[in-house]
Image (cartoon, grey):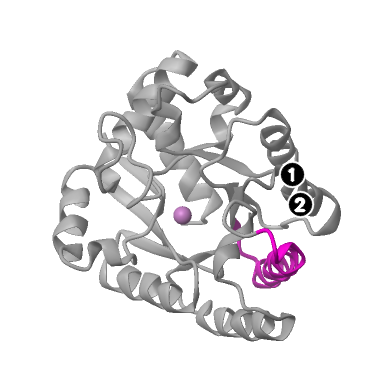
């Protein structure tokens, strides 16, 4: 069985000691494609570097809402750098970008500005976007629907089980990606996964974070994606083989690989 892990962070410090080994290992164990996701300038550069060194790895670059500058001017200069880096062939998306009111609520207007400007950039570059939305469902929907709609599709990454968000995403032509939390015992509304048609479903690890059960709490890597796939297969009433195949195809389509 082969898997496409649509969202990984092998650019994170958590892998500084054993990055090469882990990357070799995941490929051997069937994760034959992944996109390493940037979240600031430095980590976007690192994502490209890793993608250049490994044929089966691609990169997304962008500024996460927790890493944006303190002024509009600073944000625009960050985005200018991202634009320059996007000419690299292994860059397949702009992300992760979006809104995060869990860690910071003081700069909501700046977060919205950075999100909208980066959707603009993706539209200009004809790239899909990778969306991070935490404790900000209403504003995420408002921006995607009424302020700036991604024209080359995108992914609701580590999507929360919220009917409005999933339905809005689907209406706008986005793909819905689920991660480890769907395996957690206290996660509610997992039946909402059934709202996502087979041709829009994706899976990811978001590693090193969010290890699925039974490895919850440990450092995550792409090999754990099978547990998330298994859980979704159970909910949808299909085989894990079918999940691996359909999510692989969908990932290649949204990222144009
Ligand atoms: Ni992430």
x%, y% of residue 175?
59, 42
Quadrant for the N terminus in the image: top left
Identify the element where label 2 is drawn: helix
Q: What is the CA distance from the residue labelled 1 to the residue labelled 2?
A: 8 Å
**Residue 61: % across, % down:** 50, 69
Residue at the spot 41% in from the left edge and 72% down from the top edge: 43
Q: Is residue 64 visible?
A: no
Q: Is residue 72 left or right of residue 15?
A: right
Q: Looking at the rendered structure, which numbered label has been put on residue 172?
A: 1
The main secondary structure of the magenta stretch is helix
Q: In this orientation, does residue 200 appear?
A: yes
Please tell me whether mark 1 sits on a helix, a strand or a loop.
loop
**Mark sitting on residue 144:** 2
Task: Report the side of 13 relative to 20 (left or right).
Answer: right
Q: Furthest-front residue in view?
A: 106
Residue 192 picture location, percent across and down: 60, 23
Of the two numbered discs 1 and 2 on the same chain, state the one appearing first in sequence.
2
Q: Are marks 1 and 2 in contact (CB under 8 Å)?
A: yes
Q: Is mark 2 within 8 Å of ligand 1?
A: no
Percent coordinates x, y for residue 196 in the rendering? 60, 28
- Relative placement, left or right, of 13 versus 94 is left
**Residue at (26, 29) in percent of width and height:** 214
Q: Is residue 163 magenta?
A: no
Residues in magenta, as a range: 105-129
* Badge 1: residue crowd in 10 Å (few <14, some 14–19, many ≥20): some
Residue 106 shown in magenta: yes
């Amino acid at each position: 069985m082969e898997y496409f892990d649509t969202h990984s962070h092998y650019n994170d410090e958590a892998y500084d000691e054993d990055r090469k080994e882990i990357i070799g290992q995941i490929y051997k164990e069937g994760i034959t494609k992944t996109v390493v996701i940037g979240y600031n300038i430095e980590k976007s550069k690192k994502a490209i570097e890793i993608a250049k060194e490994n044929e089966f790895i691609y990169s997304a670059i962008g500024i996460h809402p927790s890493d944006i500058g303190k002024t509009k001017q600073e944000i625009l200069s960050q985005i200018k750098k991202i634009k320059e880096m996007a000419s690299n062939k292994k860059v397949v998306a702009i992300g992760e970008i979006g809104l995060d009111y869990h860690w910071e609520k003081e700069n909501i207007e700046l977060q919205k500005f950075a999100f909208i400007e980066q959707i603009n950039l993706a539209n200009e570059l004809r790239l899909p976007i990778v969306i991070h939305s935490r404790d900000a469902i209403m504003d995420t929907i408002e921006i995607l629907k009424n302020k700036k709609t991604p024209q080359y599709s995108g992914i609701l990454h580590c999507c929360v089980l919220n009917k409005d968000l999933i339905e809005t995403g689907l209406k706008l032509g986005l793909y819905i990606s689920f991660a480890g939390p769907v395996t957690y015992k206290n996660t509610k509304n997992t039946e909402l996964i059934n709202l996502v048609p087979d041709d829009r479903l994706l899976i990811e690890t978001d590693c090193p974070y969010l290890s699925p059960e039974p490895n919850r709490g440990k450092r995550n890597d792409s090999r754990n994606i099978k547990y998330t796939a298994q859980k979704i297969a159970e909910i949808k009433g299909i085989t894990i083989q079918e999940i691996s195949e359909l999510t692989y195809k969908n990932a290649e389509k949204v990222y144009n690989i």
